[in-house]
Image: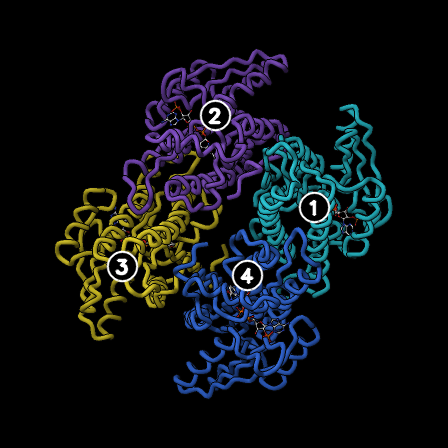
Chain colours: A blue, B cyan, C purple, D yellow
């Protein structure tokens, strides 16, 4: 998630998905930020990375983060809902708390950040913002892996939320156009409601899913050449780089060797 | 949800979805129960209806209901996850509490009841049980109605949960067969993982969605001849009446006049 | 497919899917007819079965069949598009002719019959007709079985055709209502656009798919208790038995033991 | 579709979708070729464009085109199945010939080209080829536009064919690996089975659909800022540019202003 001041072409990135210490930055989402920062730099802009600590399962934390971004950087222009997790709680015998953890980050935090990012864009008349959800192939088909079934349900919800968001924004535009929150150029509308649905990416994901069995986690990434966080970052950059009249609804991507 | 003693062919129905007073019985789920009870009666069985008060957004309430059913009727054989609600909280400006309410009943309570019903069946070696989710057409496509977008996301989750449940049970069978929880007849396996996806049904649903605007709610059912709760009940009875080797994955049904 | 005269409550069934000799009647579709005929009989109606020879891959044959039904029985009221086949032609090395065979019956004949049945209903102001497509679970997800990939593509097409048909009829009604092709009762509209999507059914299907390897074909039905044609017929009867305001969009059904 | 000689890094593009005169080149597919050619040039390769006349609704024409490419350029490395059309034949009253025309190009020609391109890659041990289907958003949801219903069915078929192709190739690899048709590097596998699903693109498409009503056709592109062929070409280039271990299954893209 970031704050891009369109006038000055500066990009200050504040990664919002950080739950813990600064070391925890070395996760998928950091890659997206790093690539964006590098891209900014190579394009001559003073892109910087501003880590922001925030527990996304706590709504107050999210709201104060958005407040801070607002007071310090005026607001949010690009929101990449990347944070997410799986817990190994099956449907037949899982614990309720594991299910709740997945819902709270994968669905609820994503929804709160989306709403806050949209409100931030709206109040500043930003009309070329982006809200990109990092969904999953598990948001499109249910694999026969019991430990991933509830996770898959949360990602199915993300599939619906992405399409719902796309629709609400089209509707809002129509309304907004009448009330003059609309730039001079008719093509400048918010390209929100986009998602990227990767298959297996080599990250900390499996190590958190199987937190009591690191060998099992490592094995998840060993039998094939997985996607790398950079590959997802490249897809995000492709989406961000499309012209304003192009809306990427979904990019489904997998390791070439992935069977399922 | 009910307790059917297969030996004695008795059916005592305990409607679990009741959150409030006895008047609240007059809802969709009651119809299913009434039809089941009537069917029992006409088939010569002493079917009765035992209302059970339980707030499904409270896990302890659910667990003590299952305890009560266990101690009084030995356990649950048929679980119809029918309770559900919509709140008018859009994605762009909805309240977090409205979103939580929908998740808590539509997804979490359904998941808890499913787990508890399965455990109840398993401990008594019931091998012809049913778990039927009342999903929605909104679990299959996102309508351009902002007030229903988050609701739709919860129903997308139900679509995934139904398929996940079907798969887990197939897997469990394989395992269970080895440990002798499997009846003599190979065809006697639990037909869980089924759902019914109705379009507009004339119930209290819209009156709870638009609780501040009863006229708007009434209007939702006026422009066409809607499904009736009995129609959904008939679909449930069709599912319950199929032989053990038949698994109905989903029945998608709409009012003939429904456009969307 | 049948001709039901609503006034006299007679049912004369003309099974349209017969490509060959009378022996070939012993296929899935016959079961639907037999069950309908039995049901008619037990309800006191003089239901009869009139086999009609017709090669569905030949448009002229279809059109003359509809002509014959028209001149002899006034027209068609219920159309069950059941005929279908799979050929073992994979995408990487299949023969073009195998692909064409599948398209011609599964998609094109179904579309022609649908159009002719609709026109027949329309010209006689039939407003409680049915057009039911026998789709497949392969119309909803692509299984990792190369020999079924092109077949699956034809059934995906059927999924779209069923939904398209539902929409066109809603649209036609609106128009027709204005031109007085609409009965007095607003609820009497054609319940077309319905489909049933079975998993594995024990029929001649696999024997035609693997026509050079009957053992392989037999094996397809041996490792589990499959659906029987009667189970599909029961689903058709359930659909036909719903009241006019109920539209069943899709029934997805599988053998309880089917994994995929 | 093109012939890329990996050794010499030369790219000779043969646009296969040309059915008529050279003027007809100014269509969507040409843009992809032009962009590829420009990209080649700017990367220092002698990319050229070799138009090839071929009626895709004629299998012999397709086969002789592949023969010609084989004898002149050794074979095909990248196959972009872009040719496609819609005819305004509805389900309730369309002509059979219109339906056939759509099937012949959108489904059958795509399948034949896919098979021939795969065989061409296989016989030359090409292991970084691409087969990209230009699908449509209409391959994912059925819009309430009667004139597009059969077209939508053909694109649903493309959705299934893309996934089927992905699976067959995974399977082929496994087998092929054992028989040594597999390069030294395990990551070098064919990235086939990819598709791009655009919403409305401003091309000749609508003018062919409504060939008797050019004003209606023009109107289809007037009420919003549509996708341009270049936007689809950019998506193709993004897909072609991903590293060998990345498989883009689908990119769904729409004009930002498109409602449906
Ligand atoms: N890896 C895969 O195979 C795969 C495949 C498809 C989709 N995805 C999706 O990709 C996204 C990123 O996952 P990943 O693979 O990069 O996994 P990861 O390495 O575990 O990273 C997950 C990120 O989410 C953050 N996060 C989790 N809970 C949080 C909370 N309560 N508050 C703040 N931050 C929190 C983590 O921060 P901390 O480290 O500080 O906890 C971490 O930065 C997720 O949405 C996931 O569902 C992953
Ligand atoms: N009506 C439609 O158009 C429609 C369409 C598709 C699907 N559905 C689904 O059909 C199902 C039944 O809905 P309905 O149309 O019959 O709506 P309804 O008339 O509002 O009935 C909902 C039922 O859920 C119960 N419930 C809600 N929250 C509860 C809680 N916390 N604890 C216990 N019970 C609770 C309600 O009990 P109280 O009355 O005591 O609160 C009521 O019995 C839902 O899953 C809904 O999503 C409805
Ligand atoms: N069996 C399964 O596992 C399964 C699963 C899902 C869906 N389905 C679907 O169920 C439907 C019925 O198939 P089935 O399983 O009953 O297979 P089946 O035993 O092979 O029956 C197919 C029927 O289609 C008829 N047919 C085929 N081509 C024809 C033509 N050109 N002209 C006239 N009739 C023709 C056959 O008639 P002749 O015998 O005279 O050729 C036969 O009556 C098909 O749409 C199939 O796709 C089957
Ligand atoms: N335009 C849209 O809104 C849109 C949206 C989604 C997807 N698409 C898809 O995009 C693809 C390209 O369509 P387009 O929009 O670029 O339409 P277009 O301008 O009409 O181009 C279609 C191309 O297909 C070729 N073609 C058609 N039939 C052929 C045949 N029998 N033999 C050889 N070539 C044939 C045409 O060649 P000739 O000109 O020589 O006939 C033309 O080059 C199609 O698959 C279409 O379904 C289009």
Q: Residue at x 63, y 63 (%)?
A: A102
The residue labelled by disc 4 is A162
Question: What is the quadrant of residue A87 in the picture?
Answer: bottom right
Separation of residues labelled 1 and 2 (CA atoms): 35 Å
- Closer to the eye: label 2 or 4: 2
| Front residue of this view, candidates B179 and A19 | B179
Say whether residue A55 is left or right of residue B14: left
Query: How far apart, in angstroms, are the residues tagged by discs 4 and 1?
Result: 33 Å
Reply above or below: C234 against B157: above
| Visible residue check, residue C186 | no
Mark 4 or 1: in front is 1
3D distance between C-alphas at marks 3 and 2? 44 Å
Query: Picture coordinates of residue A182 (x, y %)?
Result: 53, 71
Mark 3 vs mark 1: same chain? no
Q: Are marks 4 and 1 on the same chain?
A: no
- Kindly identify which residue carries mark 1: B118
Which residue bears the numbered disc 2? Answer: C28
**On what subunit does the disc labeled 2 rest?**
C
Estimate the x, y position of residue B118 in percent, counting from the top left.
Answer: 70, 46
Q: In percent of the image, x 32 and y 63: which residue is there?
A: D188
Measure how far apart labels 3 and 1 are at the Cα level.
51 Å
Q: Is residue D117 left or right of residue D224?
A: left
Q: Residues within 10 Å of mark 4 (few under 14, many from 20)?
A: many
* Residue annotated with mark 3: D78
Asked whether the beta carbons under mark 3 and mark 1 sit within 8 Å of each other, the answer is: no
> Do the residues marked 1 and 2 share a common chain?
no
- Residue at disc 4, CB closer than 8 Å to ligand 1: no
Q: Label 4 near label 2: C-beta < 8 Å?
A: no
């Amino acid at each position: 998630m970031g704050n891009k001041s369109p006038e000055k072409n500066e990009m200050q990135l504040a990664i919002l998905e950080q739950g813990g210490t600064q070391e925890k930055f070395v996760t998928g989402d950091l890659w997206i930020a790093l690539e964006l920062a590098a891209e900014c730099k190579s394009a001559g802009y003073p892109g910087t990375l501003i880590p922001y600590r925030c527990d996304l399962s706590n709504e107050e934390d999210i709201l104060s983060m958005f407040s801070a971004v607002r007071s310090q950087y005026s607001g949010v222009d690009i929101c990449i809902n990347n944070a997410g997790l799986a817990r190994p709680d099956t449907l037949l015998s899982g614990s309720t708390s594991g299910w709740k953890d997945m819902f709270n980050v994968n669905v609820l935090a994503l929804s709160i950040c989306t709403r806050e990012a949209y409100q931030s864009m709206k109040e500043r008349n930003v009309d070329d913002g982006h809200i990109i959800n990092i969904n999953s192939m598990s948001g499109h088909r249910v694999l026969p892996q019991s430990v991933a079934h509830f996770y898959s349900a949360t990602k199915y919800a993300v599939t619906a939320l992405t399409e719902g968001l796309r629709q609400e924004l089209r509707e809002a535009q129509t309304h907004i156009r009448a009330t003059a929150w609309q730039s001079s150029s008719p093509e400048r509308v918010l390209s929100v409601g986009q998602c990227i649905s990767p298959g297996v990416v080599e990250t900390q994901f499996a190590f958190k899913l199987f937190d009591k069995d690191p060998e099992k986690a490592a094995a998840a990434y060993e039998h094939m050449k997985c996607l790398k966080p950079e590959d997802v970052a490249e897809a995000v950059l492709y989406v961000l780089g499309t012209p304003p009249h192009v809306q990427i609804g979904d990019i489904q991507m997998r390791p070439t060797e992935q069977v399922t």
